[in-house]
Image (cartoon, rainbow, N blue to C red):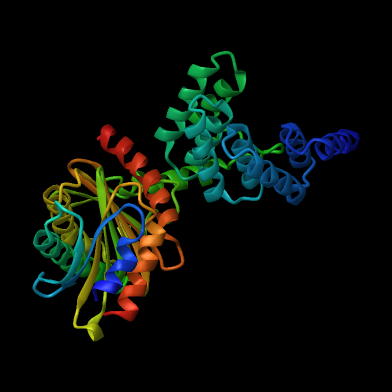
Amino acid sequence: MSKALDMITRVRGVRGAMLVSAEDGLVVAEQLMEGIKGGAVAALAASLAGRLRRAMDAAGTGTSVFWHLQAEQGALLVVPGGEAAGSLLVVSVTEPDVNIGLVRLELLRVAETAV
Amino acid sequence: MADDIRALSAQLAQDPQSLVFLRLGEALRRKGQLEAALRVAMNGLERHPHLADAHDLYARILTDKHNYERAFDEWDMAVRIAPHHTGALKGLAFLYFKVGDIEQAEAHLAAAKRVAPDDPSIDQAIAMMRKGVGPPSPTPSPAPEPATTAASSTAAVSSSGFDEARVFAGLEGANEGLLLVDGAGRVLGGALRDASGADVTDSVAAYLAGVSQEAARTAKLLGLGAWNGLSAEGQHGNVHLAHPTPEALLLVVRERGMPLGRLAILAQRATIMAQRWLERQ
């Protein structure tokens, strides 16, 4: 799993990547730069994923396959692994100027292969 | 006119980077050769994407082709590039009038008048609009808006109680894929429909405040600063959530085929419209 996360953290501007249990917000695997609190990222990403899922269900857009929280000093990018994968989330914390498209591709690849 | 077109075409062929495409495109448009005009304008825009006059030309051709949504986008872009572009301001006024937003139409004409106080066409447009007739179309042979059509269009928009429809007037999907809510999840404007056409406005609005609070908490606790947008791809559609003001939330929902980048641009436009609308309330 660590090798799979490598694919994400190799992208320039990525500060960390994790596998998170969507149900309880616990860390399953992580590869983070210093200063990033894995436990907090996992809990917050899982909580936001849950709220977003309910809003998207209500809007009729179906389950999310990728989401991206943009902030002034960075971003959080998430690919939900789906029910078959035991509801894992592939999560990445990045710098603000990262290549979002590239990180998205790597997250999707990890979700397909490792989760 | 035909000679002009031939001469301008030759000049453009000699120097494809020159701005002569603006005159050629306009000449073709005036002659009614809209497809040729469109090609010239698009080629010009590819070479000069930050030229407001190129967006203005493209918008005028689109208006001639009755593609008002795209024309709106192009004039909107022209004004972003050059806020004092009178042609684009007049074009936007024309389109706002067409959707019944007289207030915005007048505001854009007033803005154009501030830039070009001696332009008689602006006074003429203001006078016509006040009489209930549409301002002159940017097309060369304007078909005056029948007063009855204009009036009924205005009535249709104004009849929506809290003026929800006006928030995003002129923007694609204004009443089915754009939603403005306050911090407590109360609907301020716009509406949402799911794929079956069912109105899901209230149920989605109720969830948005929670999503926003969680997004703010997440960004803050992870040291990412203030959040400024949340994009998501769904199995059947894509969404973008933004906050035009600290107290309001804007949700844009589109079909799965619209890329997130384009959705973010659309959300940016809707955000500006929502901010203007909120300032007026």
Q: Residue at x 23, y 83 (%)?
A: A85
Residue B259 image position (x, y, % from top left): 44, 61
Q: Is residue B207 left or right of residue A8?
A: left
Q: Is residue B29 left or right of residue A105?
A: right
Up/down of B278 relative to B270, above or below: above
Up/down of B49 relative to A106, above or below: above
Depth check, front residue: A104 or A16: A16
Q: Find the residue positioned furthest to the bottom.
A: A84
- Give the quarter of the image for residue A104: bottom left
Up/down of B21 relative to A55, above or below: above
Quarter of the N terminus of chain B within the rendering: top right
- Give the quarter of the image for residue A80: bottom left
Q: Residue at x 47, y 43 (%)?
A: B151
Q: Residue at x 32, y 52 (%)?
A: A13
Depth check, front residue: B159 or B14: B14
Residue B242 image position (x, y, % from top left): 28, 49
Depth check, front residue: A84 or B228: A84
Residue B149 image position (x, y, % from top left): 52, 46
User: Could you tell me if residue B118 is visible in this image?
Assistant: yes
Residue B226 image position (x, y, % from top left): 20, 43
Q: Residue at x 59, y 39 (%)?
A: B55
Q: Is residue A12 left or right of residue A50?
A: right
Quarter of the C terminus of chain B within the rendering: top left
Q: How many marks?
A: 0
Q: Find the residue positioned furthest to the right.
A: B3
Up/down of B239 relative to B226, above or below: below
User: Could you tell me if residue B194 is visible in this image?
Assistant: no
